[in-house]
Image (cartoon, grey):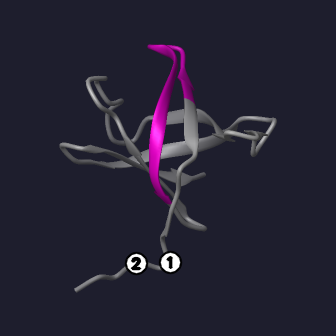
């Protein structure tokens, strides 16, 4: 049974994720909600669950958020990672 608090919406955005341990990596966004995002990680090694990263979301028209926001890795799957707004 799905127990999500927020409705997900598919997205074609890109997500710029920054952390001191790996620098900045750009990922494709699968979906987004008021609580967070799910990112396809591809061949990149995902940060461990609990890691707080800085995130900027982008569309082909430009940045959605100019200033990076803090997000926490809350789960990992084979295809990607789930991030929650902190």
| Residue for badge 2 | 4
Location of residue 61 by image quarter:
top right
The residue drawn where x is 51% and y is 77% is 6
Rendered residue at 63%/41% (across/down): 70
> Quick one: SS at disc 2?
loop
Asked whether 41 or 47 is in front, the reply is 41
Name the quadrant of the N terminus.
bottom left
Left or right, 60 with reference to 43: right
Work out how far the residue at label 1 is from the one at label 2, CA to CA, in angstroms.
7 Å
Q: Looking at the image, which residue sits at the far right?
A: 66
Tell me which corner region of the image, top left, top right, bottom left or bottom right, holds residue 78. Answer: top left
Q: Which label sits on residue 15?
A: none
Please identify the quarter of the rendering in which residue 3 is found.
Answer: bottom left
**Magenta part, dominant SS:** strand
Image check: 28 left or right of 45? right
Q: Nearer the viewer, residue 75 or 27?
A: 27
> Going by the picture, which residue comes out furthest to the bottom?
1
Residue at 51 percent of width and 36 percent of height: 52
Question: Mark 1, mark 2: which one is toward the viewer?
Answer: 1
Above or below, comparing residue 31 to residue 40 in the picture: below
User: Does the magenta portion include 24?
Assistant: yes
> Residue 25: where, in percent of width, then height?
49, 22
Asked if residue 13 lies left or right of residue 61, the reply is left
For the record, the magenta segment spans: 17-31
Left or right, residue 34 beside residue 79: right
Q: Which residue is mark 1?
A: 7
| CB contact under 8 Å: marks 1 and 2 | yes
Q: Is residue 72 magenta?
A: no
Q: Is residue 85 above or below residue 52?
A: below
The residue lying toward the viewer, choosing from 34 and 52, is 34
């Amino acid at each position: 049974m799905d127990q999500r608090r927020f409705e997900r919406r598919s997205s074609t955005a890109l997500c710029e994720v920054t952390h001191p341990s790996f620098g900045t990596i750009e990922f494709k966004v699968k979906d987004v909600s008021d609580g967070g995002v799910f990112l396809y990680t591809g061949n990149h090694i995902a940060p461990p669950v609990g890691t707080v990263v800085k995130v900027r979301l982008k569309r082909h028209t430009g940045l959605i958020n100019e200033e990076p926001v803090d997000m926490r890795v809350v789960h990992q799957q084979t295809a990607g990672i789930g991030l929650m707004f902190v």
